[in-house]
Image (cartoon, helix red, strand yellow):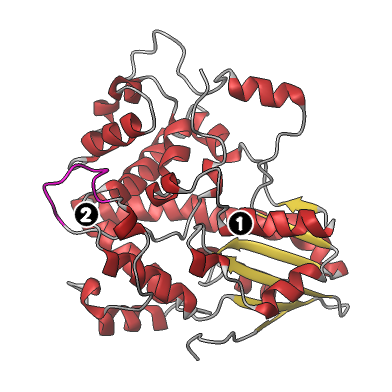
Amino acid sequence: MAHPVRGFARAGLACLALIFAASAAQAQDWATREVCEPPRIAVFDEVFAPEGAEELDRRAALIPNATGRFWRVTAPGGGTSYLWGTMHSSHRSVLDLPDTVLDALKGASRVALEIDPRFPDRESHDRFMQGADVYRPAPSGFRFADLGLPGDIEHNLGNRLTSLGWPRTALDQLKFGTLAELLLYDPCEDFTGGVLPTQDSYLQTLAHIQGIPILPLEHRNRLSNKLNTPGNEDLARAIIGTYAIYLSPGATPEARATGLGLYQQGRVGVMMAWDRAQISAALGNEGPALYARMTDYLVDERNVDFVNAARDALEQGGLFVAVGNFHLPGDKGMIELLRAEGFTITRIALPGEAP
């Protein structure tokens, strides 16, 4: 069976696409063209309720390197590279990259991305198209309901599966890795998938045109392999539980415009604080623990691995690193990890960004 997983891993963190409010609508009904393509990109403070803009600003101020998307990386030996925080979206405001960023990419000797989703050979292509590693072995005895996730998660995820061409019963048949990769994909990309690239894919396309080699910072199947490995059920539950909240109905054009506006302004710390507050609250008493478990792996652990994978190239210089913007800030973010290893990291402020 051919299935719509291809490229979903590129969706990743930091799209902040689906901040929601309670609604009786179906889980997929909110993802209209009107919501996904708001007429004006701006920050609407009213969407920050109940915390409020002032409180989220306060929380963001506690996060190191909370403002800025573009950073110069200078190695101890003097080599210069660049670090860019992406947004995994095909919205035109996200694809309209600043000239400074484009010039740095075109001048790079290599471009480092979270993954390289291209098939390395015919065998891997055929294996994917045949649905290998997608389904649990039958009979597995697994029931999604046994995960005990709160709220309407099972209902909303079932709706998402049907919109992608799977029966609702596939919830009990798909492996954890498959479910997670589906959830990491923004439903607003349904309108443009296979037509318009997300920003990460756009950067890879530009590198391809320029003949610049790609340095993947992790294997493209790493997440699914991790979640499908026995012993990682708690991690799978945390990732599926937190990302399923993004399917909740009730998103508004103002909320989506605000996510895009914060990104344009480089206010990554506010994006992170808003995301944590909304998702944790939606998951009830278990929310903070599930969110922390998710970020421990998807952000913190992978930050370490990204730095390890890029280190040699960064020491040489000439590398353009593009990763989801949530990977940059924080005590355990890539900026602080690189500084701890002797690299000098300097923000390059872009037009329209906050100071």
Q: Is residue 229 left or right of residue 250?
A: right
Numbered disc total: 2
Crowding at mark 1 (Cα within 10 Å: few <14, some 14-19, many 20+)? many
Magenta-highlighted residues: 22-30
Residue 68, horizontal then vertical, whole percent: 54, 80
Query: Which residue is rendered at x = 49% and y = 58% of the image?
Result: 89
Q: Is residue 90 visible?
A: yes
Residue 302, horizontal then vertical, whole percent: 58, 53
> From what the image shows, is residue 295 above or below residue 62?
above
Which residue position is annotated with label 2? 282
What is the CA distance from the residue labelled 1 to the residue labelled 2?
Answer: 29 Å
Question: Is 28 part of what is drawn in magenta?
Answer: yes
Tell me the number on the disc at residue 45.
none
Q: Secondary structure at mark 1?
A: helix
Closer to the camera in the image, 242 or 353: 353
Residue 222, horizontal then vertical, whole percent: 60, 39
Query: Which residue is rendered at x = 35% and y = 22% of the image?
Result: 170
Pick out the residue farthest to the top.
139
Q: Secondary structure at mark 2?
A: helix
Query: Which residue is rendered at x = 51% and y = 86% of the image?
Result: 352
Please tell me in which quadrant of the rendered image residue 225 appears.
top right
Tell me the number on the disc at residue 200.
1
Q: Is residue 284 left or right of residue 104?
A: left
User: Which one is closest to the eye, mark 1 or mark 2?
Assistant: 1
Closer to the camera in the image, 83 or 93: 93
- The amino acid type, in three-letter code, at marker 1 is Asp
Q: Is residue 273 visible?
A: no
Residue 290, horizontal then vertical, whole percent: 33, 49
- The amino acid type, in three-letter code, at marker 2 is Ala
Between discs 1 and 2, the one toward the N terminus:
1
